[in-house]
Amino acid sequence: MKQQIAHIALVVDDYDDAIKFYTEKLNFNLLEDTVLSETKRWVLVAPQGSEGCCLLLAKGVGDEQRSRIGNQTGGRVFLFLKTDDLLRDYKTMLTKGVKFKREPKTETYGIVAVFEDLYGNLWDLIQFTNSK
């Protein structure tokens, strides 16, 4: 048996704002943006050079879903963006206005910095010492 995670749903407030943030601030690729209905779209974004899993930007509908926007994990880091050059990406992201909650720090497993997306979800920008 062979399985893999295809997409991770990220609840957002607005499709276009989210697309703009991920493509312009984080330099992700917009893989798909298909209108499904008057209020629903199928929007996939992924980091440059990424293979496999990508983010499905899902507009929050109703009070329950909207209450999760920006805090899908109760304040913990939600997603981990692996890079081959953390300092390069950190500096680029800073110039584009990405807000970092923790500056780069060397850990036993590599270098890590914590940033937030446009809604406040926390991400680790991480460069592993060994390939993982």
Image: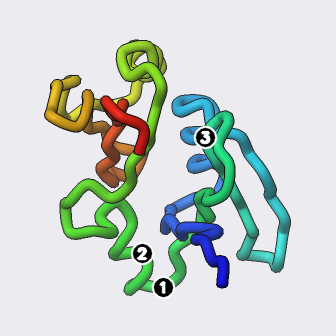
Does the CB distance between marks 3 and 1 fall below 8 Å?
no
Q: Is residue 52 left or right of residue 64?
A: right
Where residue 16 sits in the image (x, y, percent)?
Answer: 66, 50
Q: In the figure, residue 75 lies in which quadrant?
A: bottom left
Give the quadrant of residue 24.
Answer: top right
Q: Earlier in the sequence, mark 3 or mark 2?
A: 3
44 is higher (above) or lower (below) than 101: below
Find the distance from the CA under tag 2 to the CA under tag 1.
6 Å
The residue tagged 3 is 47
Q: Position of residue 54 (x, y in %)?
A: 62, 57
Residue beneath the point at 44% across and 13% down: 88
- x, y percent for residue 73: 27, 68
Q: Which residue is tagged 1?
A: 62
Mark 3 vs mark 1, CA separation in Å: 29 Å
**Residue at x 75%, y 69% (from the top left corner):** 41
Of callouts 3 and 1, which one flags the residue occurring earlier in the amino acid sequence?
A: 3
